Image (spheres, helix red, strand yellow):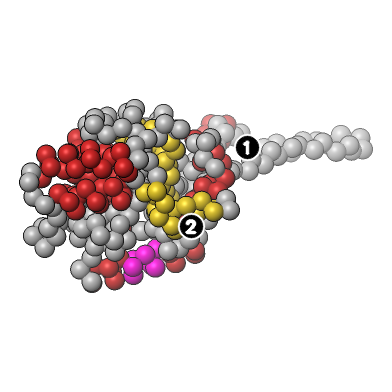
Amino acid sequence: MVRWSRAAAVLTLGVAVAGCEVAKPVTPVPRPPARPENLQPAPPPKPEAPPEVRSSDSLVLEKYYARVEKGLLSQGLLRKDGGGRDTPYGRRQLVENFLKIALYDEYARVGGGLVARTTPSVLRRWETPVRMQVDFGETVPNRIRSADRAAITAYAARLSRVTGLPISEVGRGGNFHVFVMNEDERRALAPVLRTRLPGLSEADVRTITELPQRDYCVVFARAGSDGAYSSAVAFIRAENPDLLRLSCIHEELAQGLGLPNDSPSARPSIFNDDEEFALLTTQDELMLKMLYDPRMRVGMSEEEARPVAEEIAAELLGGDS
């Protein structure tokens, strides 16, 4: 874990010796003998730990996202049940949702930036083990650090069981970087992003460091020409209250595995901007199973992936339509 630290200025005190005239000798005034304890130099004061100072901008955002979560919960959103009898889906729905979410991108690059525009793509996923490295900002309290690290570790294990891909949380040497930070730490994150992910474009770096208030979190995954991912970075605002942060963990880490799009017809699913579900659902797990099924191949087009998706969906859900 990398802690962000403030620069400390060390002042070196120089001793100046000034010239003086030679004076007549004087009789020294006897002094009382020094006490033994005075012969020992006083111990240096213990350095104080730098205070965890958050900016007013960060505190304002914390209150804002608390209101957002409260409003969503009051509408019955941010569900944690994974779906139930009120959210049925069948084989055809699973296939269409998978193709829409795995074979399309949510954003398109325009003029060096990103705009919300659904764009056809190819199937992308990891072909090598995923090592998730979590970094917290200096002002993120220990309560959040402990909760989020435990959540990411458990979620990585769950994603590994679902996909069959080795996925783990590591202390160093990660290829999937997860940053949980407050506002000022996010604004200063560019040098770290360039070092950790040298292939990340400057536009993507700016997207993170200039993340608008409406976005709770974001993820970028880098794929080679063959469609295989080699690195990823997710940023999660520490100002988010507990459930919104956990929701970000579930959505961004799963999207970074190869389900990059959202679809308004996907239900139950976290890959839907209506915020109905906060946590990975039963259908989301099936889509991840489909994505990492050996019959799927990186670089597949929608036309190539459709018959394979139909075959796998029939096996997962039987004859249900």
Q: Position of residue 153 (x, y in %)?
A: 27, 39
Residue in front for this viewpoint, 175 or 296? 296
Instruction: Estimate the spatial distance between the alpha carbons at disc 2 and disc 1, rounded to whole Å.
Output: 82 Å
**Type of the residue with mark 2:** Val
Q: Position of residue 131 (x, y in %)?
A: 35, 32
Which residue is tagged 1? Answer: 32
Segment tinted magenta in the rendering: 62-68
**Residue contact between numbered discs 2 and 1, judged by CB atoms under 8 Å:** no
**Height in image: 73 above or below 81?**
below
Q: Earlier in the sequence, mark 2 or mark 1?
A: 1
**Type of the residue with mark 1:** Pro
Which residue is tagged 2? Answer: 115
Please indicate whether residue 45 sits to the left or right of residue 253 in the image.
right
Please indicate whether residue 261 sits to the left or right of residue 285 in the image.
right
Kindly state the secondary structure of the residue where label 2 is placed: strand
Tell me which residue sits at (49%, 36%) in the image. Answer: 197
**Height in image: 204 above or below 210?**
above
Q: Position of residue 204 (x, y in %)?
A: 51, 47
Mark 1 Cα-neighbour bin, 10 Å: few <14, some 14–19, many ≥20: few
Residue 65 lies within the magenta run? yes
Kindly state the secondary structure of the residue where label 1 is placed: loop
What is the quadrant of residue 287 in the picture? top left
Foreground tag (2 vs 1): 2
Residue in front for this viewpoint, 104 or 147? 104
Residue in front for this viewpoint, 238 or 165? 165
